[in-house]
Amino acid sequence: MKKQFAILALFGALIFGSFTLAQAQDGDTAQVASEQTEAVTSEQDEAPTMDVATDAATGEASFHQRVKEKFIEGGAPFMWPILICLILGLAVSIERIITLNLATTNTKKLLTRIEDALSKGGIEAAKDVTKNTKGPVASIFTQGLMRSSEGMEMVEKSIVSYGGVEMGRLEKGLIWISLFISLGPMLGFFGTVIGMVGAFDAIEAAGDISPQVVAGGMKVALLTTVGGLIVGMVLQVFYNYLVSKIDNLVNDMEDASITLVDMLVKHKIVK
């Protein structure tokens, strides 16, 4: 439930941030235009310099306007689902990045503390160290230490079994990112097909194949494709980063688990 609230909060923050940025840019554009008008009126001798500044400001302000125009030209029924896929995919990706970073543990330091605890206080002291440490590695160690009285075989089985559980938790949410990576371009191609159908309908109605007749449908077709591909590319970068992060965590879990078993044998806790 907490993760669902976190995703919703990130979703709302992204939407609020986009609208706030749009309003801020519009306000800045109006202010710049007003200041430039007053400056041109009061200083006619510096007209060439002000024209250059006006062109630069117009170029900066027009980027946001052009994005909005292309979004509208692409058609709301097609562009809004693509945008929603992007926002939801980013929300899940950010939530996963935060979760995985919090799950990262300094395994070398943890193993050193466990070995000191085994030397000084035995198995119970080692359990206290792992229970007071957050992360999947510490959780696996706790399960292994709890089975130490049952022999080496049970310790290894416990570590392997609980390692699979922790790995499943680490991979949670990736299926949704994968879904949005596939769904974004698919929605874009769907808009492409609909745009082409509209273009051919216009040709049929007009009885002519002039560029003016097919321009509208072709524009929808191309813009929706571009939007879908952008969603797929952006989310693919996040997905690959998350997969790499999970692989590193799993490798750390496996290496640390082997070291833990060696420690238990070394201190003659298991046989």
Image: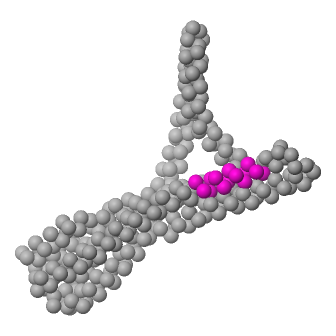
Residue 220, image x, y percentages? 73, 51
Q: Residue at x 38, y 59 (%)?
A: 98
How are the residues colored?
Answer: one colour
- Residue 139 shows up from this direction: no
- Residue 147 shows up from this direction: yes
In the displayed structure, does residue 3 sit left or right of residue 62? left
Q: Residue at x 52, y 41 (%)?
A: 20
Q: Is residue 40 magenta?
A: no
Q: Is residue 80 above or below residue 57?
A: below
Q: Main secondary structure of the magenta part?
A: helix
Query: Which quadrant: the C terminus?
Result: bottom left
Query: Which quadrant holds residue 67?
Result: top right
In the displayed structure, does residue 61 sit left or right of residue 101? right
Residue 264, image x, y percentages? 15, 82
Q: Which residues are magenta?
A: 217-230
Of all residues shown, which one is farthest toward the left?
120
